[in-house]
Image: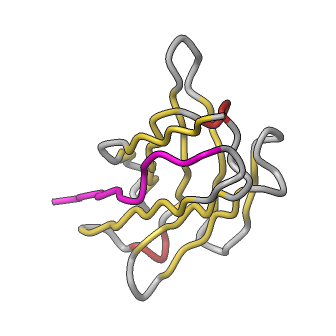
Amino acid sequence: QVQLVESGGGSVQAGGSLRLSCGVSGIIFMRAIMDWYRQAPGRETELVAGITNEDRTAYADSVKGRFTISRDNVENTMYLQMNTLKPEDTAVYYCHVKAPDDRNYWGQGTQVTVSS
């Protein structure tokens, strides 16, 4: 059974930092492709950052230079380090995994709230 467990959300003031974690079990983690998405009220779901099984990364223009995606293939965990947070970063953040068999899995979501 595949499980994705997110943690690390919360409330911070603008300029602050948070680190999101996504623990994964039930798949061959090191071969998975992983992403972070976010959903803000009244807005479309946005792909925030992605990391391949070869550690290549990509970011949305809105977070470049502020967010860093990473993965730990020993701990089977993906991270999103978010620095210099802005009120417009407020959203529910979801981790997404594309497993080696091409199946897709989602975390439960974690709320990030940035106040001005």
Q: Quadrant of residue 37?
A: top right
Quadrant of the drawing holding the C terminus: top right
* Relative image position of residue 13 (x, y in whole percent): 61, 45
* Relative image position of residue 100 (x, y in whole percent): 43, 62
* Relative image position of residue 69 (x, y in whole percent): 64, 63
Compared to 40, does 96 lie above or below? below
Compared to 36, does 82 lie above or below? below
Most common SS among magenta residues: strand
Left or right of 35 on screen, residue 65: right
Residue drawn at point x = 72 percent, y = 51 percent = 15
Left or right of 56 on screen, residue 53: left
Closest to the observer, 10 or 48: 10
Quadrant of the drawing holding the N terminus: bottom left
Residue drawn at point x = 75 percent, y = 50 percent = 59
* Relative image position of residue 102 (x, y in whole percent): 43, 51
Residue drawn at point x = 45 percent, y = 35 percent = 92
The boundaries of the magenta stretch are 1-13
Closest to the observer, 8 or 103: 8
User: Is residue 6 located in the magenta-colored stretch of the structure?
Assistant: yes
Closest to the observer, 77 or 104: 77
User: Is residue 78 located in the magenta-colored stretch of the structure?
Assistant: no
Q: Outermost residue toward the left?
A: 1
